[in-house]
Amino acid sequence: MLKSFILILLMGFFVGQIAQRLKVPALVGMILVGIILGPQAANLIDPGVLAASAPLRTIAVMVILMKAGLGLDREKLVQQGTVALRLGFLPASCEALIIALAAMWIFKFDFPTGLLLGCIIGAESPAVIVPGMLRLKSLGWGVNKGIPDAILTGSALSDVLLLLVFSLLLNFLGQGTTSSLIILPFGLTLNPFLLLPIQIICQIVLGVIIGLATAKILVLFLAKQNWTQSTVQDTLVAATLALLLVVLAEILPLFSGYLAVMVTGFFLIEFDAPLARKLRSGFDSLWVVAQIILFVLLGASIQIQVLEKTLVPGLIILAIGTLIGRAIGWYLSTVGSNWNWRERFFLLPGNSAKATVQAAIGAIPLAQGIEGGETILAIAALSILVTAPLGAWAIPTFAPTLLEKGEVDPTKVGVTRSILLLAAVDTSSVATQVLTKAADIARRSDGEVIVLHVIQTNNPQEVEFQKSTSQRLLADIRHQFITVTGSIPEEIIRVAKDYQVTDIVIGKRGHQSWDKVLVGSVSQTVLASSSIPVTLID
């Protein structure tokens, strides 16, 4: 098993990076690694790992849903009104129904079997949609109207609906109509389909309540009682509780575990924003590993050989479901909203990807002996191969064209910012203090440093001394030492702009008090002329 995990992590990471450098989503490379390492090709993944792939994928989906919850914006959701709610039910329902009708025509399925296929294919993939929407939020695309938030919420709700219908259909097809009836007191019987609306409401309401309670528990122990001492410990406790919600939901299917996880993250922002920020950082780190395991095992689970007979009709089914079924649902979901036609059209690339749900439940009908199960499995595999890479590529590609860019709210989503410092040094004793300060900032922010020395005298020994001092004080920090000639303040500002540094660290010459004008023509000129933040060392 250890060899398998080594192969999964190393090959998944590097092939994913190669895919990114080829301008292809990293998950494409990871899925490809899974197909190659899996039983369909090289068969290098231990059977024990494959047997544990479902719970491992569950852990990964938990991580991404917590990230989604920690990135939701309450104000934007309120602003959208019922759009997010409608997106949670209408697109998936319309796609499932259209696929059911198309399957009856193409594969000669009866309606329940066709609807079973529709529920599998209609479910949206949080593993593709959530990272894509969070990326858009971090860049500001569509945030003014809360479009990423509406899509995130809608995708979570739609999976609750379709998984419920799927379980009912599975029971109906596997056991027959009579045994599927629910017997009530006094000899009354009830078809479980009549209870479906109540079950959906129950799963959603209880999911919200349990998620809210979990958020309060986390705030109590992690923020108020201070049971943890680091972000790593905070993340460990939060991830364990979130996973517990998913496990409890499988044992007692009265609430949606995945929805409860997402709601937990959402309420953490409302109850304790600093804790939410720390957890956002921790779950970002977890996702680095979780996504590799998720998509590599996803690729390993794809049954390539079952695609041969259903490739063309399967593609037709996917096209009909998306371009007709989902299109109707998207239109009905955004009627009366403030979305323009470009924003509505963005739902095609932004709300269509399938992956995790299809991998989790696509093989169940075949395993339970339902007629047409092999065809259902083939189309589920095809939907992953086609829509997951396409969705991961289309979301960032079409967002700049179809969405408006707004201001990023760093309190709701992690914003990555590379820190590059410019430390301007001369031959005075203040230079050591400048380098020490720059080193301290760089260590705290995992940043890099450019050490700039503007040569004023023809003394190579001074340059070598400053270079050796820089190497000593910045030994554990990525840095480079550069020298230029010219006017000191002009060169500092020019180099800062050329290298696009985020901060400038310089020394203040002279010994006058702060209540007077800052002394030193260099510091005065840089402070007056630079649009980049300046840290002045006395």
Image (cartoon, helix red, strand yellow):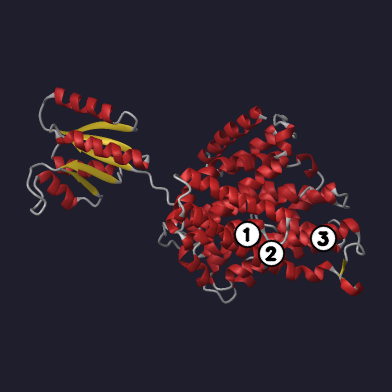
Q: Which mark is residue 389?
A: none
* x and y percentages locating residue 462 in the rendered image: 15, 26
Where residue 259 is drawn, which disc sits there?
1
Q: Residues within 10 Å of mark 2 (few under 14, many from 20)?
A: many
The residue tagged 3 is: 169
As drawn, is 416 to the left or to the right of 5? Answer: left
Q: Amino acid at mark 3?
A: Leu
Q: Nearer the viewer, mark 2 or mark 3?
A: 2
Q: Verify CB contact (< 8 Å) between mark 2 and mark 1.
A: yes
Q: Is residue 300 above or below residue 462?
A: below
Residue 257, percent from left and from top? 66, 56
Q: Secondary structure at mark 1?
A: helix
- Dot 1 surroundings within 10 Å: few (below 14), some, or many (20 or more)? many
Q: CA distance from mark 3 to mark 1?
A: 22 Å
In this view of the protein, which residue sits in the foreground, 87 or 108?
A: 87
Q: Quadrant of the C terminus?
A: top left
Mark 1 belongs to which amino acid?
A: Leu
Q: Residue at x 57, y 62 (%)?
A: 212
Q: Residue at x 56, y 36 (%)?
A: 13
Q: Is 238 left or right of 332, judged from the image as shown?
A: left
Q: Amino acid at mark 2?
A: Gln
> Quick check: can you spot residue 109?
no
Residue 430 picture quarter: top left
Dot label at residue 203: 2
